[in-house]
Image (tube, helix red, strand yellow):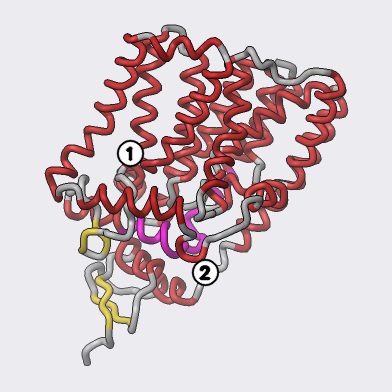
Amino acid sequence: MRSTSRWLLLLALSCALFNAFAFTASTKVMEWDEARRGVAAFEMLERGDFTVHRYRGEVDTFSVKPPLGLWAIAASYRVFGFNRFALRFPSGLAAVLTVVVVAGIAFRLFGGDAAAVAALVLATTPPFFLEHSARGGEYDAPLAFLIAALFAAVLFARHPVARAATAGVLLGAIVLLKSFAVAIPIGVLATAALLTRERRLLWRREVAIAGAVALALVVGLWVVPRLLADGGGFFARMVDTDLVSRTTQPLEGHGRPWYWYLTKLVRHSVAWTLLLVVAVAAALRNRDWLRRGSFPEMVIASWAVVPILIATLMQTKLAWYVNPVYPCLALLTARLVRALPARTTLALVIAAALVSEVRIVRKITKARELPPHERHLLALELPPGSAVYAPEWSQAAYFVARVERGYLPRIGTAPR
């Protein structure tokens, strides 16, 4: 690896750390997913029940996600205390680790220069950090990390049985994090295997058994206790809401045209999209395209297509459904940009990173403006356990009052 690449890699890691963690202890808490999960993880610790998650004392029937994300937030609470930084730390850590994994994949496949470019592309991709991802208490950054780690294990594990067992563990973790999102890596690997000779491995008995057993053991750690706790009601809701309903109808008004994700990818990361287009044109001109017979390169190609195809087929469309694609786009850019002259590549990469990082910093700065209800609750000087009253409690306000301040939120007016 040349000294320039080392500096670019150091710059990428610095940007990733800043973009993932800067001011996360002081930016506003987001309604719905982030606030609800922050409260649910708090109550999980409070009750000591890590099987059935609750929200405001009641079994949570709104969130039908498995508990791995809540376990991670609860563990973070234990380390950092009950605050918004701890709520967001697992996502930020996952995003930084994804940058590292992507750099590792690029280094093994394409060399040190490509590793630096891939890391810098991902570390300064705005939606990867800003949209329901690395800077919030959500599950999409951990999902991207698990998928990237899974592909790294599949590509570089030497023994087929060890590779299958590792893949089974990581697939099980994806199921415990976001249930049916496991269709993304399965679809990617199946597509790549069918396009190359790796499809022969699918028929080896010991490989299939190792993967299936590892997957079953990981998922069973939670599925069996949950079934014993409340029967199959939770899993019926999970199938109905997260699979059937999201696939067949636009939930909560999130219906979009079929091409919406393509425009979203272009608009939210313009600088890197333009560089990728230039790199594709140069690669086609120099005939330096992806090799169809190469399993690693077919994994990357499938990784770029399958998640977007799955998200497009779903009737409910949200920007973060394509979050797993950004690591792949970073790898593609690093792979194809090699067709450009070295000096041109360096200039374009630095320019695109600068434009993208400025956009991220502006968004981070804007998010530091706390809403009035948060400022009011944070300014109160009451002992923990004090009752605080309001006509109604938004999810973010409830998180601040109950988790961060240790108060007991009540609906109504304070007694005189």
Q: Residues within 10 Å of mark 2 (few under 14, many from 20)?
A: some
Q: Position of residue 114 (x, y in %)?
A: 70, 22
Residue at 28%, 29% (x, y): give it.
Answer: 218
The stretch of residues the image draws in magenta is 18-39
Give the secondary structure at mark 1.
helix
Residue at 54% x, 54% y is 317
Q: Is residue 29 visible?
A: no
User: Is 174 included in the stretch rendered in magenta?
Assistant: no
The residue that label 2 is drawn on is 370
The image position of residue 39, as x and y in percent, is 32, 59
Q: Is residue 32 magenta?
A: yes
Q: Is residue 38 left or right of residue 258?
A: left
Q: Is residue 33 visible?
A: yes
116 or 378, which lies in front?
116
- Give the residue at the far left of this rendering: 228
Of residue 100 and residue 280, the one placed in the foreground of this image is 280
The location of residue 16, given as percent across then percent down, is 59, 39
